[in-house]
Amino acid sequence: MTFTTPLQENAIKIMLLGSGELGKEVAIEAQRLGIEVIAVDKYENAPAHLVANRAYAIDMQDEAAVIEVIEKEKPTYILPEVEAISISALFEAEKRGFHVIPNAEAVNKTMNRKNIRVFAAEELGLKTSNYEFVTTLEGLKDAGDRIGFPCVIKPVMSSSGHGQSIARTPEDIEKSWEIAKEARGDASELIVEAFVPFDYEITLLTVRNETGTAFCDAIGHIQKDGDFILSWQPMQMSAAALQKAKEIAKAVTDGLGGRGIFGVEFFVKGEEVYFSELSPRPHDTGMVTLITQSQSQFALHIRAVLGLPLAYTTYGAGACGAYKAKHENSNPTLEIPDSAFTEKSFVRVFGKPETHTGRRMAVSLVLDNDVEVAKERALEIAASISDN
């Protein structure tokens, strides 16, 4: 491959549509290969804005605004990094000859839980929990009665757990309806899922391009309200369950096509593996790869986009703990003890311009031969951080 120099007429350019902490790491990896980066988000000074060659703050659900910035910059590759994007703008960009990663139809399917669930369960025949889609409170009540309790209720378009809840009894339905309105995206339609009494859940990072498909070691994670608190790699699981997960992940990513990394989520009960969700981009829980792999999920994403080989090696077991803000502040500071920075641990601070309660601001990362020790230490470091 021929590599270019940023800011020159022949520069390879990527445009990030969504510039949070995951986009920031993608931008850094692109910069390491001399790729020009344009970071776009709905607010100024988003994390990836801080490391990009140019930055824009626009309404990313406004088709005209998205097309305008694409036509202005003419990127080689467009990388959607969040759910709340005008899908019609991505289809229009493809019509105009721009390369959307992995492709506009894959983004359309995966950024809407209804589309990806119907695709996985009904078109590909993958094993999932029972589900229904509803648009009204009465419909939600009826679906809850049919599916049974507890049930999981999520907006069809949201991210990081926003708007998600578990209704344990019929009396919880109205509260879940209200919680769903907190979606980061579109709360006009909800998915109601039967609760799978799983033993554990995993993310299987699956990366593909014309050179083939590669899998990272399975990542275990603990979530609260749909947002991760702790992730670790590798997740101990049976060879049979892991093989099933790989087969499902390959089937769904082959079905979607295109280049890039996909965060494929599963519930595992014994040897049974249930497809849950999929993100066509780096995954929150995959931040653990910043310390466990020679090529993190972000580096692999860029390699996949460029059509490069997807080889990497692992350094060992590791864990990642999320730090969430406890205060509201328009000029935040984080207090992190020096003990967090050792030969086998460090913290990544995202640099978000303001905090609100529960906003993820940093992660702790720990490498250790014993994954349980890494998990305990990652949580300990995250708990030692404070914000002002």
Image (cartoon, helix red, strand yellow):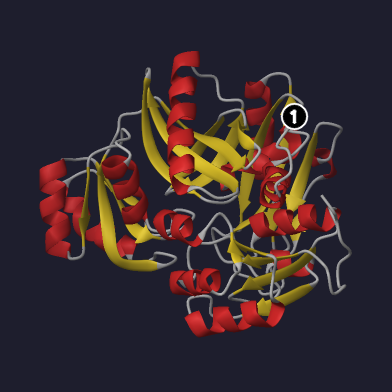
Quadrant of res 299? top right
| Circle 1 Cα neighbour tier, 10 Å, few/some/many (<14 / 14–19 / ≥20) | many
Q: Residue at x 43, y 35 (%)?
A: 251
Q: Residue at x 53, y 75 (%)?
A: 60
Residue 149 visible in image: yes
Q: Secondary structure at mark 1?
A: strand
* Image position, residue 199 (x, y; %): 39, 24
Task: Give the left or right position of residue 162, taking residue 310 as reference.
Answer: left
Quadrant of res 13? bottom right
Task: Give the left or right position of residue 249, taking residue 292 as reference.
Answer: left
Q: Up-down: is 182 above or below 92?
A: above
* Image position, residue 300 (x, y; %): 70, 43
* Image position, residue 275 (x, y; %): 38, 36
Residue 332 visible in image: no
Q: Residue lying farthest top?
A: 239
Residue at mark 1:
367
Q: Residue at x 26, y 45 (%)?
A: 193
Q: Up-down: is 273 above or below 73?
A: above
| Viewer-proximal residue among 21 and 87 | 87
- The total number of labels drawn is 1
Label 1 is placed on what type of residue? Leu
Q: Quadrant of the C terminus?
A: bottom right
| Viewer-proximal residue among 165 and 259 | 259
| Viewer-proximal residue among 196 and 93 | 93
* Image position, residue 317 (x, y; %): 69, 25
Q: Up-down: is 221 above or below 156?
A: above
